[in-house]
């Protein structure tokens, strides 16, 4: 049967809309997922805009595979309108000085860029996998794959591993663009739009499929080492039976962590796929793992922290419920950084889930309100939004901090804030 990809971030409105229509037809109030109002707080952080670049607007559903890449001098980012940009990371006075080069392709860019030596690897909506020069954006080679390239290209030992929307995983020579091998997995009738990249370790690829299956493949041949059905489809309709593994699999401390939609968070043995523990939770965003815990935003935008070894819940933070969160990222050794769908950046304490700080990127009714990617390089925060904007911020102490800490205006706490 035909595979019908849905936008993994906006699909949730579909069953709710149908339910609302049904309830209204019965003269009952409709069901609405109202975002949780932000609690009042004084933030020690503020965002100072270093520079901002704009391209064309794009749909949120086309942003799943887009990421930032960087070298010592420049940051690289792509837009689904087909524009690939190289920009100086250091602030410049003029746009023409900030942008090193821009290249417009005749097809939407949906994944990447990923650095490979002096080149960038990108994937497109027409199934093209391309290597382009970091210095000029000129095409080095182009390889046609079977369908849309939606996953971030992962590169190991001169080999690119990339997934396409039709259920295939390709191994491609990063120097020549030649396809080494292709593995195909049968897709369910319905799945969320977006594909998690593969996870690599010790000559093994770990892949989470839309069927709820996790596979370990030989990276050189594509042959299956083991396969585990982590999630079991349940329900009468295709919507109810969706068990996509959309989050990137994380290998940490000898365990493979997997999160599924309509499913579970599980810790598996990377050697054979055997189960260490599981927790009932549904999610689809990329999650975080450190030496102590697994940090997750579930499908309702509630944050959770689970013990790395037992799966015991450490804390739960409900202040972001229905606020349409982005993927999580680490800000420093103590904090998690996440953006919501209303233009606000949040800092959360890893230890107990308390709110540390917040800053606004755009107004809720702004065309730029929908943040799709947040990237922290240790010095700046880069934000990409559906208005086509890339914004580089420096995190600084807020006026609130200066006012409430007059006794230590240049002290340790302020220094920690500035360094992030």
Image (cartoon, rainbow, N blue to C red):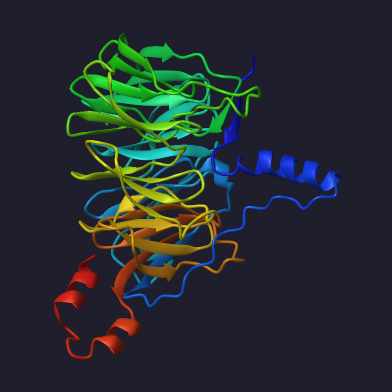
User: Is residue 173 in view from this perspective?
Assistant: no
The reply, left or right, for residue 103 in relation to residue 181 is right
The x and y percentages for residue 57 are 58, 53
State the residue in front, 152 or 106: 152
Q: Quadrant of residue 179?
A: top left
Near-viewer residue (332 or 293): 293
Tell me: residue 381, above or below residue 311: below
User: As rendered, which of 93 and 360 lies closer to the eye?
Assistant: 360
- The quarter of the rendered structure image containing the N terminus is top right
Indicate whether 254 appears above or below 86.
above
Residue 276 locus on image (x, y percent): 26, 26
Coordinates of residue 6 in the picture (x, y in percent): 60, 34
Please tell me which residue is depicted at 23% across the width and 36% down the height of the picture.
117
Residue 381 is left or right of residue 342, and the answer is left
Which quadrant would the C terminus be assigned to in this image? bottom left
Total marks in image:
0
Q: Quadrant of residue 267?
A: top left
């Amino acid at each position: 049967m035909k595979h019908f990809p849905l936008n993994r971030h906006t699909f949730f409105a579909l069953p709710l809309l149908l339910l609302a229509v049904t309830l209204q037809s019965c003269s009952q109030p409709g069901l609405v997922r109202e975002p949780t109002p932000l609690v009042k707080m004084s933030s020690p952080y503020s965002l100072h805009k270093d520079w901002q670049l704009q391209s064309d607007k794009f749909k949120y559903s086309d942003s799943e595979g887009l990421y930032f890449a960087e070298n010592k001098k420049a940051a690289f980012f792509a837009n689904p309108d087909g524009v690939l940009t190289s920009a100086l990371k250091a602030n410049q006075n003029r746009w023409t000085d900030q942008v090193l080069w821009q290249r417009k392709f005749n097809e939407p860019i949906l994944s990447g860029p990923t650095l490979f030596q002096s080149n960038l690897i990108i994937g497109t909506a027409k199934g093209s996998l391309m290597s382009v020069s970091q210095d000029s954006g000129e095409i080095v080679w182009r390889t046609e794959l079977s369908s849309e390239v939606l996953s971030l290209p992962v590169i190991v030992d001169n080999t690119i591993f990339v997934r396409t929307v039709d259920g295939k995983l390709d191994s491609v020579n990063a120097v020549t663009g030649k396809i080494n091998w292709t593995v195909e997995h049968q897709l369910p009738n319905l799945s969320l739009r977006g594909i998690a990249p593969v996870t690599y370790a010790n000559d093994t690829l770990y892949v989470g499929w839309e069927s709820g299956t996790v596979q370990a493949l030989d990276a050189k041949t594509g042959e299956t080492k083991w396969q585990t059905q982590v999630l079991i489809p349940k329900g009468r309709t295709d919507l109810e039976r969706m068990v996509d593994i959309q989050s990137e699999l994380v290998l940490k401390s000898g365990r493979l962590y997997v999160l599924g939609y309509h499913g579970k968070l599980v810790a598996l043995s990377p050697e054979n796929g055997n189960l260490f523990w599981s927790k009932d939770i549904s999610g689809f965003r990329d999650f975080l793992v450190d030496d102590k815990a697994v940090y997750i935003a579930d499908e309702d935008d509630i944050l959770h922290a689970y013990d790395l070894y037992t799966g015991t819940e450490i804390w739960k933070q409900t202040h972001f419920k229905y606020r349409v969160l982005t993927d999580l990222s680490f800000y420093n050794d103590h904090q998690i950084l996440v953006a919501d769908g209303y233009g606000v950046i949040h800092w959360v304490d890893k230890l107990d889930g308390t709110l540390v700080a917040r800053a606004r990127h755009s107004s809720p009714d702004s065309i730029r309100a929908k943040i799709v990617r947040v990237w922290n390089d240790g010095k700046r925060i880069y934000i990409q939004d559906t208005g086509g904007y890339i914004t580089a911020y420096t995190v600084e102490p807020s006026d609130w901090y200066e006012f409430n800490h007059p006794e230590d205006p240049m002290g340790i706490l302020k220094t920690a804030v500035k360094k992030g």
